[in-house]
Image (cartoon, coloured by chain):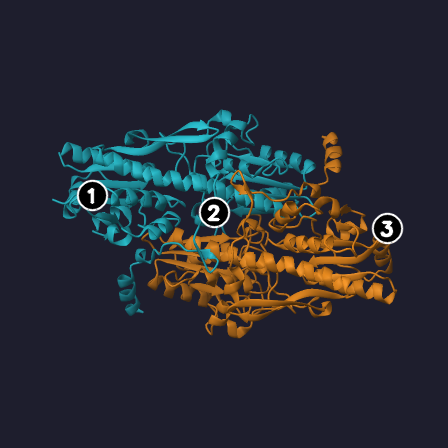
Chain colours: A orange, B cyan
Amino acid sequence: MAKNMIIGQSGGPTAVINASLAGALEYAFGCDEIDTVYGMVHGIQGLLEDNVINLTEHFAHKPSRLNRLSLTPAMFLGSCRFKLSQKEDEYEQIIKELKKYDISYFFYIGGNDSMDTVEKLSQYVAQNNIDIKVVGIPKTIDNDLMGIDHSPGFASAAKYVALAVRNVAYDTAIYNIKSVHIIEAMGRDAGWLAAASVLARDSENESPHLIYLPEVPFSIEKFISDIQRKLKEYNSVIVVVSEGIRDENGEYISARSDNVDKFGHKRLSGVGAYLQGVVEEKIGCKVRSLELSVLQRSAGHTASLTDITEAQNLGMIAVKAALNGESGVFSTLRRTSNSPYSVEYYTERVGVVANAEKTVPRHWINADGNDVTKEMLEYLKPLVRGVAQIPYRDGLPDYVNISHLDNRNQRYTEDEKI
Amino acid sequence: MAKNMIIGQSGGPTAVINASLAGALEYAFGCDEIDTVYGMVHGIQGLLEDNVINLTEHFAHKPSRLNRLSLTPAMFLGSCRFKLSQKEDEYEQIIKELKKYDISYFFYIGGNDSMDTVEKLSQYVAQNNIDIKVVGIPKTIDNDLMGIDHSPGFASAAKYVALAVRNVAYDTAIYNIKSVHIIEAMGRDAGWLAAASVLARDSENESPHLIYLPEVPFSIEKFISDIQRKLKEYNSVIVVVSEGIRDENGEYISARSDNVDKFGHKRLSGVGAYLQGVVEEKIGCKVRSLELSVLQRSAGHTASLTDITEAQNLGMIAVKAALNGESGVFSTLRRTSNSPYSVEYYTERVGVVANAEKTVPRHWINADGNDVTKEMLEYLKPLVRGVAQIPYRDGLPDYVNISHLDNRNQRYTEDEKI
């Protein structure tokens, strides 16, 4: 009987999830134990709907296409937000699908929800003596995964944030007037991405001047007085805030009752826009807010080469582990040295990462709660190093086509209804 | 008597204004007719305040620093928003400053307001038989300058818009749900930058699906029905709008009475955020808006190599023209061939560009007013080609330091007041 593998992607996109896919594919194509490699389109949800493609046909013996996949942001296989229930028949349906494709190895690239899927499925197959190895491959821009030094995808988003802050600092420095720019970074309840803006500083460039993370309760009054102090020192003050900052009661600043859109709807994003209004009211100088939004997680053209390489290696390590009989684990890395930077790869029980969250340690944030410490800078610095050689066509990155994600057959039938 | 030159920058920043400065400096350093090169800090306003630095000391015999200047976004010399009045004493003050530094050649890099300054000053020196040549060097991301095929700075901003739209298209394609993303581009009353998003398309990628420019009256009803139609065909619909779109009465959509912030203040930017609210209300699917804001004009790390080279050449041509005795002109370029792309450089009376505005020709926009034509695509394509080799340090672009723009002496005296 053929021994096939299937791989899927889940959760939010990053610039290097496809690099992990490419790494897994490269390893699988190179070993005799695996016959055909399949992909779940839209993750476990797609598998339940038998939405499966043949990745061997797509990428085997196509090294340059596989390289382009490594440099293509977001998810070639598409994503889903699907949490496995405890319902027996859901597992039976999954196993039925996996048997249909003679799957012996199951891989899932994702964050802590996806690792929960890996955990549950690996337990189910073990309990039912089904010979399928189930292995996770980590990713998230938020860097909030336990059991890993830093999450693949984080470094490229961190680099984007630092690039944006440095460019905005140059843009805003040109006028001889007082101004405040508030840049909002993602990261949910972890401040890692906002913290990464510190990389924009160098010996001469002091931006960002203030950094606020969710790990420290946020006070509007303190925020205003911090800015007033910085405005005495600088013409152009650059402030970075994490989307997840909360007040002393744990309420999201973005969820303030007076943070409403034109229809009076509460906004759950846009803390930067909200704080812009506050600064305009309390200080009255020129204020602008920028929400980096999905640009920070999708910028394949400025991905960190360190990030891409590590994501590829974590894909390879996962396949290697499954072939060695491991299951219910995920591929991970630990930092063995910071300068020179080096990591070592290994596997870890997936239970370590599932449904847990790693936030910024308090001692990596300054006492005042408006900046990060030298330890944070040292942790971040090596991650953004290296510039990937992106293949360009007509001046734009030549990514691998993902039009298969938008179901054209269905689309055209819908067309006829028009 | 020494024959010195002075150069200044004015108006809004672009990724390549410093490339024009570098081009002018390189040419000036290489010819015997010019002794010392000075820079006005904060343009003509800085000159009136005797805020002048010695650029020969900064850059002569420093080729690698001059190259880094070419790749540094925004303005090394800082900017101002200063329109010359008709007051005689203002001109006398300027001439007094220029005589103080033995200036024979005056250069001003900017948009149409800056070219108005060049026009007025060149007329004043001519009428008063003062032997100073006054020459303009064009720039603007808006591409709305007359008398030039395309404005330096536009191509790099256009490339940023196309990169952002392509990345967002990949990011949003991963979920199997209906969604709308509205991306707001700059450009004031000209649609060139929003139009440049068409470059994100290729044989397989059809994003952006809708493009709205200020040159065609904008109808909310039409906009909603356009999106509803596209949602039948695509899961993820990407819409690009120009910040300057207006309704049939010429009123800015962003200035709608119901486009207010939390304090009830009318917002004059944020048409994307406004339209997000409209789509949420009328269609109700997942909607997100992204304002590219200053990121699109400050992204030095993704500048178009074509743009950088042309900006450098226009700086050189301007100095060459002044040395040939020309005054009251600006350096410009015309496209002599589109494929292979080639341009020729020349000078033109500055009156041609001052206070005028070039918008998108109606026949480069489709009949429906929600897309651009093949002519526009052909015009844009060559401009974004070429990737500059940016020097990186620790994974971030190694720009030339501009901390001299923030007056530290003044800053520290203000400090003492704390």
Disc 1 designates what residue?
B34
Residue B315, by quadrant, is top left
- Which chain letter goes with mark 2? B
Direction left: furthest residue: B1
Q: Amino acid at mark 3?
A: Lys
Instruction: Indicate the chain on which mark 3 is placed.
Output: A
Return the x and y of residue B228 as percentages of the image width and height.
65, 36
> Is B179 or B400 nearer to us in this picture?
B400
Q: Is residue A216 or residue A405 the one in the foreground?
A: A405
| CA gap, disc 2 and disc 3 | 47 Å
Q: Which residue is mark 3?
A: A100
Q: Position of B319 compared to A103: left or right?
A: left
Of labels 1 and 2, earlier in sequence is 1
Query: In this orientation, does residue A28 appear?
Result: yes
Residue B50's tag is none
Q: Quadrant of residue A86?
A: bottom right
Per the image, the residue denoted by label 2 is B302
User: Could you give the CA–CA distance between mark 1 and mark 2, rounded to whole angstroms?
Assistant: 34 Å
Q: Position of residue B166 (x, y in %)?
A: 57, 43
Element marked by disc 3: helix
Relative horizontal placement of residue A348, taking residue B397 as reference (left or right): right
Q: Secondary structure at mark 1?
A: loop
Q: Amino acid at mark 2?
A: Thr
| Place of residue B87 in the rendered image (x, y in percent of width and height, measured from the top left) | 19, 39
Question: Mark 1: which amino acid?
Answer: Ile
Q: Determine the residue positioned at 37% across, 40% down.
A: B311
Residue A320's x, y, as percent? 73, 62
